[in-house]
Image (cartoon, rainbow, N blue to C red):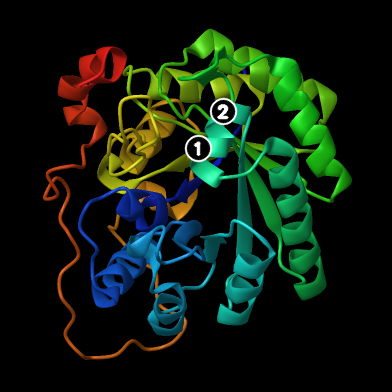
Amino acid sequence: MNFPDRVRVVEVGPRDGLQSLQETYPTAVKVEMVEALAGAGLEKIEVTGFVRPEVIPQLADAEELLAQVQRFDGCVYRALVPNRRGAERAVASGVDELVGLITASETYNSKNQNMTVDENLAAISSIAQVGAGAGIPVVAAIGIAMFCPYEGDVPPARVLALIERMRADGIDEVYLATSVGLDGPLAVHDLASRIVDCWPDLTLGLHLHDTNGMALANALAGLDAGVTVFEGSICGIGGGIRMPYGMPHFGNVATEDLVHVFAEAGVETGSISRLCLRPRARSRSSSDSRRPSAPPCGAEPSSTSSSSAGSHRMKARTGP
C-alpha cells in the first residue's frame, strides 16, 4: 500500500460530538474539553458551530466559548458555519478556520440544511468570500458522499461536480464524509482516487463514521488513495445523522483509534501520537478558577465509542 509519511488528525468532538448528544453542556465544560484536546497535541480542533441557537441549542454559546478558551501554540481552532452570517460571527469571534457543509443528496440536503444543493453551493461561495476578506482559510465538507439513506448510492460524478464548483470559489481543502457509515474501503478508495487524479493539488480529507465497523479499514483505503487529513471524535461521541427513522446519536470514528491505526501503519500524526505524555504548553496562562469536569468517555448514554458501537450497528441497518 502507498501510505504518506504523515497525516493530520482533526478533532470534531467539541462540535459534531456534543451537538449530537441530548444534554447541553455548560460553556465551562466545553472549554475544559477543548483545552484538554489541544493540550494533548491535536493540531486542529472543530470547537463549535455558528448556527441558529433555536435549531442547535447545544452550540448556542459559540461566541462565549471562543472568548473563554485558551490558545495553544500550533493548534488551529475551527468552526462550522452554515452561511455568510455564521461566517461573519465566527470571524468576529477570532476563529482560525471556517468549514462549510454540503451534502451530495438533494433529499438529505433539504432535510438537514433546509436548502437545495445549488442554494448550499451559493452559501459556501459566500462563506469563501468572507474568509478571503478576513484572511481566514475556508474548507468544505461533503456529507453523504457515497451513500444516501433516502436516495441510495451517490454517483461519483455528482461529488466531482460539487468539488469543481467549490474550487472555482477558491476552496482548496475538501473533506468527504461517510455519513451513514455503511460505506466500504473499495468505494472510499475509488472516490478518493478520482478526486486526487482530477485535482492533485487539492488537500483531501475524510470524515468517517463507524456504523458498519469499517471506519479504520476505510481510513487505510483513503491513505492509499492520497487522503492526508482525517477527522475523528474523541471516544467516538456524536455523529448522528437524519436517518429515515430518526436521528441516531452515534457514528463518528474515535480519534484515538485513528491515531493508533496510523501509528501501527508507520504514519506520523504529530504530537498527538504521544497521547498526552507531554502536554503542550498554552500560549497564555489559564485561569485558576475551577471548572466543571468535562464528560468522561462513555458517560453520556446516547454516545458510543468505536469499541462499543457493535450493539448499534444492526439497529442502523434495520431501524429501531
Q: Which mark is residue 107?
A: 2
Q: Are marks 1 and 2 in contact (CB under 8 Å)?
A: yes
Q: Residues within 10 Å of mark 1 (few under 14, many from 20)?
A: few
Q: Amino acid at mark 1?
A: Lys
- Residue 82 in sight here: yes
Q: Residues within 10 Å of mark 2 (few under 14, many from 20)?
A: some
Residue, x 57% and y 23% (percent of image)? 222
Q: Secondary structure at mark 1?
A: helix
Which residue was labeled with disc 1?
A: 111
Q: Residue furthest right?
A: 168
Residue 172 vs 285, above or below: the answer is above
Count of number-bearing discs: 2
Is 130 displayed left or right of 253 in the figure? right
Q: Amino acid at mark 2?
A: Thr
Q: Quadrant of residue 18?
A: bottom left
Residue, x 21% and y 42% (percent of image)? 303
Q: Quadrant of residue 206?
A: top right
Is 159 displayed left or right of 313 in the figure? right
Is 126 displayed left or right of 24 in the figure? right
Q: Position of residue 168 (x, y in %)?
A: 88, 44
- Residue 268 in sight here: no
Q: Position of residue 181 (x, y in %)?
A: 40, 23
Viewer-closest of 59 and 69? 59
Q: Position of residue 127 (x, y in %)?
A: 72, 60
Residue, x 38% and y 17% (percent of image)? 214
Q: In the picture, which quadrant includes the N terminus?
A: top right
Viewer-closest of 26 and 191? 26
